[in-house]
Image (tube, rainbow, N blue to C red):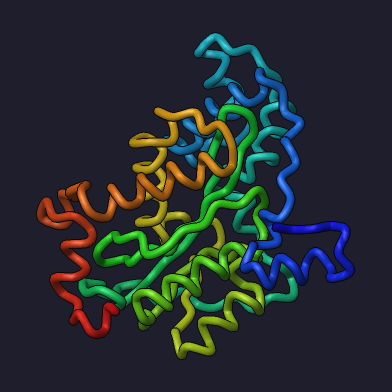
Amino acid sequence: MIDATQELPISRQAELLAISHSNLYYLPRLTSEADLALMRRIDELHLNYPFAGSRMLRDMLWLKGVKVGRQHVATLMARMGIHALYRGPKTSVPHPAHKIYPYLLKGLTIDRPNQCWATDITYIPMRKGFVFLVAIVDWATRKVLSHRVSISMSTDFCVEALEEAIAKYGKPEIFNTDQGSQFTSAEFTGVLKANDIRISMDGKGRWIDNVFVERLWRTVKYDHVYLHAYESVSDAKQQLAEYFTFYNTQRPHSSLGKRTPDMAYFENQPIGQAA
């Protein structure tokens, strides 16, 4: 669909076709098979021990018989966009020119749909290479309202996911994010302000402030990502979309009284407002 020989700029062609700029080109990651396997193991360890830095992860890998240097572990962590908890994930590096908003959820009871939404970005391994996943989640019901897959940690795929969620489900009273530059950007916060949505942001390095999205990543990865080797970006998009349909409509949650997220969301949500 994109024609580089046309006079119309490629960026404008992508805009007209509603194609994300971050996914306009897919350049294979120049990552060895050995490093991809190691990154997968680092991702699993980081998911379970988010406080572990490159030194501790190196030592954990050594205990499992994987001999690797600390600097190599640190290099791969940077490529994946993760850091130890005390320094915060690299996906959450704030932009010095962006405004940081206060955390609004402390002590707040969140017990109804569309009271609060949250979002985050996570690393997703594939058979060869990797992508990043963003999801918009309804805090009270755990429902995944929208998601996007991208080859880079850009702002536009986060904005696209946000706009889709609002178009489908209306708007929340509060939207909570971490302090990542994608979420503090004028593009992202501008959509929230235009819809009169109160903006809440986690404390620096405090993953616990956005705990329900962190739990979603753990569920997605152990339920699906680690059991499948996505062959391509398009395969990752298709399979993750199918998983989130299952997650919303068929996977019961003990915290929801063994109901699915869809059941919890729509049972308490007027149909007109949901539409």
Report the number of discs.
0
Q: Is residue 139 visible?
A: yes
Could you tell me which residue is drawn at 77 percent across and 71 percent down? Answer: 12
Could you tell me which residue is drawn at 71 percent across and 65 percent down? Answer: 14
Extreme residue toward the left, this view: 257
Quarter of the picture holding the C terminus? bottom left
Could you tell me which residue is drawn at 35 percent across and 56 percent down? Answer: 212
Q: 55 or 91, which lies in front?
A: 91
Left or right: 194 in relation to 210:
right
Q: Is residue 14 above or below residue 62?
A: below
Could you tell me which residue is drawn at 50 percent across and 47 percent down? Answer: 237
Left or right: 270 in relation to 186:
left
User: What percent of the width, then of the height, locates residue 273?
Assistant: 26, 84
User: What percent of the width, then of the height, locates residue 265?
Assistant: 22, 68
Q: 145 or 3, which lies in front?
A: 3
Q: Is residue 56 visible?
A: no
User: What percent of the width, then of the height, locates residue 92?
Assistant: 60, 58
Extreme residue toward the top, this view: 65
Quarter of the picture holding the N terminus? bottom right
Q: 236 or 264, which lies in front?
A: 236
User: What percent of the width, then of the height, locates residue 105?
Assistant: 36, 73
Q: Is residue 188 above or below residue 150?
A: below
Q: Is residue 22 above or below residue 77?
A: below
Question: Based on the displayed image, in which of its 4 quarters is residue 68 positioned?
Answer: top right
